[in-house]
Image (cartoon, rainbow, N blue to C red):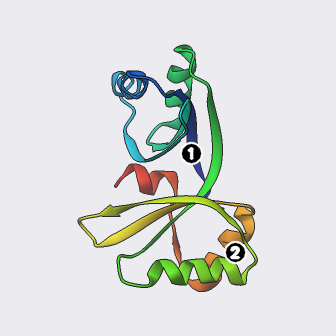
Amino acid sequence: MNNIRQISVFVENKPGRLSAITKILKDSSVDIRALSIADTRDFGILRIIVDNPDMACKKLRQEAFTVTITEVVAICIDDEMGKLSDVMNILNDADINVEYMYAFLSKSDNKASIILRVDDNAKAHEAFDAAGIVQLTENDISGM
């Protein structure tokens, strides 16, 4: 199984917090490969995929940020009309719930990479294997 470690950082919704996080990662030579932020009036959750999750967690925690690691699934599909719908149908047919997702595109190969938080990673991996969907590893993402 090729789960990807996603880092979630609790962020107070005030000026300078995202700047502080990205500076810590930059100063630690940690490269952000994908990100998503969900916010409310008072706080947000920054979700990031990085090339060195262990270092990122260590450095952020040293600076008193609340950090968790969540295993997510990452896939790669052609950047074509309807492909995301096909993926959602695969998961629906396997009775897998998607809690959230975010995506990023690769300019070089016309592919879309999708990060998915689902309720059953193992079942999602099996469904994607059966459907021939390319699943990404942390090394794949780091190399993009």
Label 1 is placed on what type of residue?
Gln
Q: Which residue is drawn at 61% across and 25% down?
A: 66
Q: Which of 125 and 83 is in front in this view?
A: 83
The kind of residue tagged 2 is Glu
Query: What residue lies at 36% left-to-right and 52% top-to-bottom?
Result: 143
Mark 1 Cα shell of 10 Å, populated few (<14), some (14-19), many (≥20): many
User: Any mark on residue 6, and which?
Assistant: 1
Q: Would you place residue 55 above or below residue 2 in this image?
A: above
**Quarter of the picture holding the C terminus:** bottom left
**Which image quadrant is residue 97 in?**
bottom right
Horizontal side of residue 125 vs 9, given as left or right = right
Q: Which of 132 and 43 is in front in this view?
A: 43
Above or below residue 2? Residue 129 is below
Q: Where is residue 48 in the image (x, y as percent from the top left)?
A: 48, 43
Judge whether 16 appears above or below 53 on screen. Answer: above
Q: In the picture, residue 32 is in which quadrant? A: top left
SS for callout 2: helix
Q: Mark 2 points at which residue?
A: 126
Percent position of residue 110, x then y: 29, 73
Furthest residue toward left? 108
* Residue neighbourhood size for the residue with mark 2, other residues' Cα within 10 Å, grouped as few (<14), some (14–19), many (≥20): few
SS at mark 1?
strand
Percent position of residue 60, x then y: 52, 23
Q: Quadrant of the N terminus?
A: bottom right
Residue furthest top in the image = 63
Q: Which residue is drawn at 37% across and 38% down?
A: 31
